[in-house]
């Protein structure tokens, strides 16, 4: 397996589009392999929406991109091998465990004829290979991940640590992935930004809000974090209220807003209710749905 990591500086709120991610996106055909935040769940009341953690496959006319590498990526790996996919991009939003924990079980990583390009944000203290290898070192995992070169790429969002979102565009088709971010929060949660005063903190918060708007602008499909209901909101966890994303999607002119990164204890019936409540509040032509695994 050839693994290449491309790097954007983490101190820029937005970044240049990575090469290889400029293909036409068929937003209505993008399968979702994992929809939960924090940790995977398995119980009768989550069967319809699914219990795997984040992973989305973007199929284009001449290539494949896989966004985030959590538990949903296991089944995707088998499918990619079945269809003889030997080269694809892996945009990684951030390295929290609920976005990378499926990687050790991703079969293409153990094949010599597979080439993977990872796109994420540059961390000031840790390389991406060291993060990947860390979760596969003994005694945590029996198979080590070795011999990886490192460069890293992405777009910055307001979430604890180093976190990014993605915009994939070609021709008239646009896909936006804006997950794990506090859109309108009062606190600067993103780590290692050059903010040393209250005014600099405020300036960075505005820059990160604008970066999220730019990611979603005119998107045919905007996948967004719906971890919290309004009354559950915690200003220090780096997630948004539903009304914040509804406002973003409406102002951005998105075609469809897809609720994603579901709270682990959120049942299928509760997710149905969230979708219904969001649809009752939207204006214009915005469509609202919730991510189901396999769709």
Image (tube, rainbow, N blue to C red):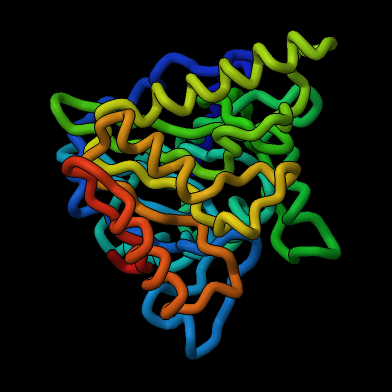
Residue 223 vertical position relative to residue 276 in the rendered view, above or below: above
Seen from the viewer's position, the closer of residues 264 and 91 is 264
Point 66% across, 42% down: residue: 238
Seen from the viewer's position, the closer of residues 292 and 61 is 292
Using residue 276 as the reference point, say whether residue 160 is left or right of it: right
Total numbered badges shown on the rendered structure = 0
Residue 121 in the image: x percent, y percent? 60, 27
Point 36% across, 21% down: residue: 19
Residue 54 vertical position relative to residue 165 in the rendered view, above or below: below
Residue 73 vertical position relative to residue 3 in the rendered view, above or below: below
Using residue 261 as the reference point, say whether residue 195 is left or right of it: right
Point 73% across, 35% down: residue: 161
Seen from the viewer's position, the closer of residues 291 and 21 is 291
Query: In the figure, residue 192 lies in which quadrant?
Result: top right
Residue 68 in the image: x percent, y percent? 50, 48
Point 43% across, 78% down: residue: 268
**Which residue is outermost to the bottom?**
44
In the rendered image, the quadrant that contains the C terminus is: bottom left
Instruction: State whether residue 260 appears in this view.
Output: yes
Instruction: State whether residue 114 appears in this view.
Output: no
Residue 69 in the image: x percent, y percent? 53, 52
């Amino acid at each position: 397996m050839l693994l290449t990591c491309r790097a954007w500086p983490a101190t820029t709120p937005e970044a240049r589009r990575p090469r290889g991610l400029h293909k036409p996106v068929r937003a209505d055909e993008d399968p979702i392999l994992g929809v939960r935040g924090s940790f995977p769940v398995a119980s009768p009341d989550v069967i319809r929406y699914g219990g795997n953690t984040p992973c989305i496959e973007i199929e284009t006319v001449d290539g494949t991109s896989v966004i985030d590498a959590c538990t949903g990526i296991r089944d995707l790996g088998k499918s990619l091998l079945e269809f003889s996919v030997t080269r694809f991009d892996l945009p990684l939003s951030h390295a929290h465990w609920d976005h990378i924990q499926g990687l050790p079980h991703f079969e293409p990583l153990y094949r010599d004829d597979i080439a993977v390009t990872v796109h994420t944000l540059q961390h000031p203290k840790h390389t991406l290979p060291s993060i990947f290898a860390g979760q596969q070192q003994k005694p945590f995992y029996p198979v080590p991940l070795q011999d990886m070169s490192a460069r890293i790429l992405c777009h910055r969002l307001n979430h604890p640590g180093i976190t990014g979102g993605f915009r994939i565009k070609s021709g008239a088709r646009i896909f936006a992935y804006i997950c794990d971010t506090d859109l309108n929060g009062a606190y600067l949660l993103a780590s290692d930004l050059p903010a040393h005063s209250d005014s600099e903190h405020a300036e960075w918060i505005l820059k990160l809000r604008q970066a999220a708007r730019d990611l979603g602008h005119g998107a045919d499909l905007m996948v967004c974090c719906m971890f919290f209901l309004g009354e559950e909101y915690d200003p220090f966890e780096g997630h948004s209220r539903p009304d914040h994303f509804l406002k973003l999607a409406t102002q951005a002119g998105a075609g469809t807003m897809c609720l994603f990164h579901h709270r682990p204890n959120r049942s299928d019936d509760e997710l149905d209710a969230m979708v219904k409540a969001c649809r009752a509040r939207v204006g214009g032509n915005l469509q609202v749905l919730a991510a189901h695994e396999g769709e």
